[in-house]
Every structure is written in C-alpha cells, then in structure tokens.
Image (tube, helix red, strand yellow):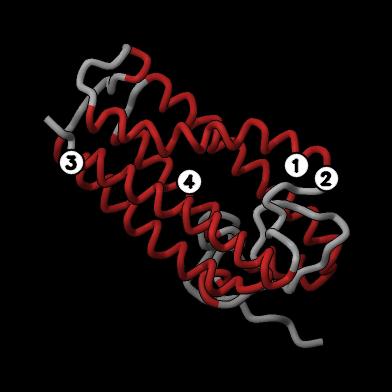
Amino acid sequence: MIQIPDLLAGILLTAYWGRAVRLAYKMKKQTGVAANWTPPEKLGQKIRMLWRPLVVFWIVHPFLTAFISDLPWLLRPIWPNDVLSWVCVAIVLAGLCVTLVCWKRMGKSWRMGINPDEKTQLIVSGPYAYIRHPIYAIQSLMLLATMALIPSPLMLAAGVAMLTFLQWEAYREEKYLAVHHGPGYLDYCQQTGGFVPRSFRPYRAVSP
C-alpha cells in the first residue's frame, strides 16, 4: 500500500530542489555565474561534499517509505502517525511556497554559497525585513517536518546534520556580509532576528 503523505513529501522536496537547480542554471545563462552552486572557497567546497549526499537522501527517503513497507530498520519510521503525517506534508508545501517568494525577492542576489570576492545587493525587504535567513529558516522547518513525517534513525541523523550545517552556513554568511556591507548590515542585524523574527515591525534602515 502506497503511503500517500510520504509520496507527496517526496514530490514536494523534488520540486523544491529542482527549482533551486533551475535557478542556478538560469543565472548561469544570464550572468555567467551559477549562483555559487560550487563555491570558490575551499571550506564551501568541502561543505558541499557532505551536504549534497544528505540532500539526495532527504529527497529519496520519502519515496522509499512511500513504496516499500519492509525497509531495513535504519530506514524504518519509529513512530508512524497518520494525522501528524498530513500536518507535516502541509508544512513542507507551505515551505515550498514561501521559499519561492524569497527566491523571487532575492533576484540576482540569490546565491547558494559564498564567494568572498563578490559583493551582492543586500536584500532587506519582504520576508528579509523580519528575519535575516528566511530561506534557511523555512528549510529548517521543512527538515523538521520531514523528520516528524519519517522518523527513521537515518532520517533523524541526517536531519540533525543538515540543521547543524544550516546554522553554520548562516553564521558564515553573516561574517561575509558584515565585511562587504559594514555598519549598514550590523544595523540590520540589530533590528532583525536570524531565524525567528524579533518583532512584527519590518526593518527600517537608519538614515545617514
């Protein structure tokens, strides 16, 4: 019997990452830069070597549990819950929709990695007027939803690893942006939260 929530989650995650790949390809054609799909910095390249297999696992695991009932114990959900499953699918769907808004807001400044020598426009409107890392925050929620939907030992371990990477990458990006945007970015950091809004008031730049 097909597990419909798991199948839908797999389809939504495929759409999410497929869209990210398409954006990087589109940017490559338009600007000659593939949104730092493979960052030029050494540390970023090493992170990608670990991150990409985890992303593939994140996408594939829901399809495995959707179609295969007798999985090895490492891939078998520990506490299946039908009601919670549909809630988790709704979170993943909402995450995809809101991320599309964030990607559109970023425009040509959207990147998937850090190039220390590149200065992009600082986006502080839309979702970015409330939190500094809306894409990472949403991706974290999607990860947590997938972990609750398919709480297998491997999915839980992979999810914790990816959540850790997201926090680390956000920290590295903030250091990079502080160098390139100086006091303006520091003021932005003081008025906004990283992954959770500090208030419902949007960011307002301090006039010089």
* Cα distance in 3D space between marks 1 and 2: 5 Å
Mark 4 nearby-residue class (10 Å; few <14, some 14–19, many ≥20): many
**Circle number at residue 58:** none
The amino acid marked with disc number 2 is: Glu
Q: Amino acid at mark 4?
A: Ser
Q: Secondary structure at mark 3?
A: helix
Q: Nearer the viewer, mark 4 or mark 1?
A: 1
Determine whether, in the image, residue 55 is placed left or right of residue 112: left
Q: Which residue is mark 2?
A: 41
Q: Position of residue 162 (x, y in %)?
A: 54, 36
- Compute the Cα span from label 1 to label 3: 36 Å
Q: Provide the secondary structure element on which disc 1 rests.
A: helix
Label 1 crowd (10 A; few <14 / some 14-19 / many >=20): some
First in sequence: mark 1 or mark 3? 3
The residue lying at 79 percent from left, 53 percent from top is: 175
Front label number (4 vs 3) = 3
Describe residue 36's horizontal placement relative to residue 156 as left or right. Answer: right
Determine the residue positioned at 22% across, 40% down: 85
In the rendering, at what x and y percent does residue 155 appear? 41, 27
Residue at mark 4 to residue at mark 3: CA–CA distance: 23 Å
In the rendered image, which residue does mark 3 sit on? 4
Earlier in the chain: of badge 4 and badge 2, it is 2
Q: Are marks 1 and 2 in contact (CB under 8 Å)?
A: yes
Residue at coordinates 83% horizontally, 70% vertically from top-left? 183
Return the residue nearer the eye: 170 or 40: 40
Q: CA distance from mark 4 to mark 2?
A: 24 Å
C-alpha distance separating marks 4 and 1: 19 Å
The residue pinned by badge 4 equals: 140
Judged from the image, the secondary structure of the residue bearing numbered disc 2 is loop
Quarter of the image with the C terminus is: bottom right
Q: Earlier in the sequence, mark 3 or mark 2?
A: 3
